[in-house]
Image (spheres, rainbow, N blue to C red):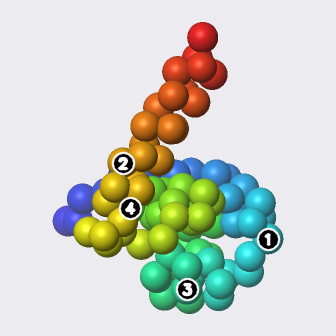
Amino acid sequence: MAAKKETAMTAEAFRDWQEGLRIPNHMAARQLGVSTNGPTNYRQNGAGRTVALACSAIEVGLDPWTPEGRAEMRALRHVLEAIRAVAHK
């Protein structure tokens, strides 16, 4: 018997993400690098951590990771940490 897959992003959260970007299923599938049935499945059942992280990256306009972009990613992480620190005060 297969282990149940972890859901890091609820179906409602995935629908909110997709509708917020106003992208149809075929476009969401292409951006996430999944089959065209993937977004339909996520809209019904939620998605795992990998998809949830990809949604976050797409939401903020990040390009796929490359070694050349590492410094930019680290700088963005520090900016995000600073924003979170201010927001949680």
Disc 1 residue type? Arg
Given this view, does label 1 or label 2 mark the residue nearer the observer?
Answer: 2
Residue where numbered disc 3 is placed? 30
Look at the numbered disc 1 and give the secondary structure of its residue.
loop
Q: Earlier in the sequence, mark 1 or mark 3?
A: 1
**Which amino acid does the dot numbered 3 rest on?**
Arg
Q: Is residue 10 shown above or below 35?
A: above
> For the point 65% across and 84% down, which residue is it?
27
* Residue, disc 2: 74
**Residue to which mark 4 is pinned:** 50
* Amino acid at the residue labelled 4: Thr
- Name the quadrant containing residue 36: bottom right
Q: Looking at the figure, which quarter contains the N terminus?
A: bottom left
- Please name the amino acid that badge 2 sits on: Arg
Of the image marks 4 and 3, the number of the one nearer the N terminus = 3
Q: Residue at the location (46% across, 82% down)?
A: 34
Q: Nearer the viewer, residue 73 or 6?
A: 73
Estimate the x, y position of residue 88 in percent, counting from the top left.
58, 17
Q: Residues within 10 Å of mark 3 (few under 14, many from 20)?
A: few
